[in-house]
Image (spheres, rainbow, N blue to C red):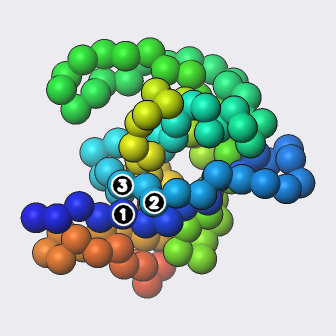
Amino acid sequence: MGLTHVTVRLKNMTAPNGGYEADFLVDTGATDSLAPGAELRKIGLLPVGKTVYELANGALEEYEYGLAEITFMGEVTAGRIIFGPDDAEPLLGVTALESVGITIDPANRTLKRLPAIPLK
């Protein structure tokens, strides 16, 4: 089964211009999204907190996170962005996907829009 990537643009909500754009790995096992910390700092994003995350290998790691505008597939949302290691592959977490009504089709590993966003 292949990996699914999508072009994502992150923007500092308090800055009028600029942003960070890259191909993000869609990771439905991740709650929050992650980008290289150096790239987030370049766009003026500041950490607003820290939390402990469980990595895929089971290790626990504390990371800073900030809040950013997240744009992908013609949709805009906002959410937590983890300040990852500077060489980290960017990850798009499930919270961002669900907030705009996009899900991953497990049969062909593509993203698809739900007909409606559930409120129940």
On screen, residue 53 versus residue 47, left or right, reads left
User: Pointer 3: residues within 10 angstroms few (<14), some, or many (20+)?
Assistant: some
Q: Are the residues tagged 3 and 1 within 8 Å (C-beta)?
A: yes
User: Pointer 1: residues within 10 angstroms few (<14), some, or many (20+)?
Assistant: some
Q: Amino acid at mark 3?
A: Leu
Q: Secondary structure at mark 2?
A: strand
Q: Amino acid at mark 2?
A: Asp
Q: Toward the viewer: 21 or 67?
A: 21
- Residue at 14% across, 75% down: 107
Badge 2 or badge 1: first in the primary sequence: 1
Q: Are the residues tagged 3 and 2 within 8 Å (C-beta)?
A: yes
Quadrant where the N terminus sits is: bottom left
Count of number-bearing discs? 3
Tell me: residue 38, above or below residue 101: above
Q: Is residue 2 visible?
A: yes
Q: Secondary structure at mark 3?
A: strand
Q: Residue furthest left?
A: 1
- Residue at 24% across, 17% down: 59
Residue tagged 2: 23
Q: Based on the displayed image, in which of its 4 quarters is residue 50 positioned?
A: top right
- Give me the disc on residue 120: none
User: Pointer 2: residues within 10 angstroms few (<14), some, or many (20+)?
Assistant: some
Q: Residue furthest bottom?
A: 115
**Residue 32, image x, y percentages:** 46, 41
Residue tagged 3: 25
Quadrant where the C terminus sits is: bottom left
Residue tagged 1: 5
Q: Based on the displayed image, in which of its 4 quarters is residue 60 positioned?
A: top left
Question: Of discs 3 and 2, which sits in the foreground?
Answer: 2
**Residue 99, image x, y percentages:** 52, 60
Q: Is residue 84 visible?
A: no
**Residue 113, image x, y percentages:** 42, 79
